[in-house]
Amino acid sequence: MPKPEQSLCLACGLCCKGVVLSGVRLTEQERTSAVYKHLPVIDTKRGPAFPLPCAKFAKGSCLIYSDRPLACRHYRCKLLAGVASGSLESHEAQRRIDELLLFVDKLEKLVTKMRSAEFYRLAAHAADPETPLPLRSQLLTAMGSAGPLWQTLRSLLDEWINSPEELLQRVDAIDDASTPTASDRAGPVLNEGSPAVRRS
């Protein structure tokens, strides 16, 4: 990866942190090697995957970068694609990343630190059109006070990061058998004292 693009990835890391996607699809051939690398492999309706945030992402970099899964190698967000094509200046891409990271920082202050990954997975199910509407409504309510902030962040992610092709390739980070029911989620997901609102 050319230096300008690589520096953007190192400055961002939102895909690895589980903010953009809920998981990474694996090929059947990659399943064994993923287990060997101590990545938690799950079976989803879209095939084998490992959930995000990635267990091999630390201090802003990938610990298995030279041997990362094929989906990670091929993933290109809109910002990265724009810089690579010359349609977006690096400094503008960095400005957008800084803005996204600011929203993430604010969001994670509302969500308990140990539960931030769970919150993003909850949010992924709530945003997934394949999730039944009644359950989606319950999940949105359960997101509580972090909901409006997530709604803004999600809009920016859709505008600056995601493309329809990437969204189609997203894998569920939670096994289908353990899809949350949302009936008792608001308490453990949010910090104590957070007022309840919802997100769409």
Image (cartoon, rainbow, N blue to C red):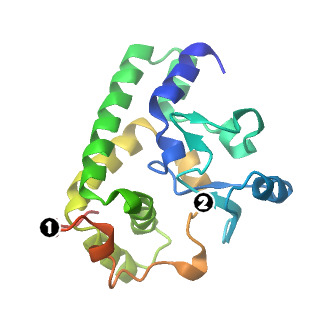
* Residue in the foreground of this view, choosing between 168 and 61: 61
For mark 2, what is the residue?
A: 171
Q: In this view, does 192 lie to the left or right of 30?
A: left
Quadrant location of residue 47? bottom right
Residue drawn where x is 38% and y is 30% of the image: 97
Q: How many numbered dots are placed on residues in this image? A: 2
Residue drawn where x is 13% and y is 67% of the image: 195
**Residue 129: where, in percent of width, then height?**
46, 67
Neighbourhood count class around disc 1 (C-alpha, 10 Å): few under 14, some 14–19, many 20 upward: few
Q: Mark 1: which amino acid?
A: Gly
Q: Mark 2: which amino acid?
A: Val
Label 1: state its secondary structure: loop
Neighbourhood count class around disc 2 (C-alpha, 10 Å): few under 14, some 14–19, many 20 upward: many
**Residue 182: where, in percent of width, then height?**
36, 80
Name the quarter where the C terminus is drawn: bottom left
Q: Which of the two labelled residues, at mark 1 and mark 2, occupies the earlier sequence position?
A: 2
The correct choice, above or below, for 192 with respect to 13 in the image is below
Residue 91: mark:
none
Q: Is residue 39 left or right of residue 108?
A: right
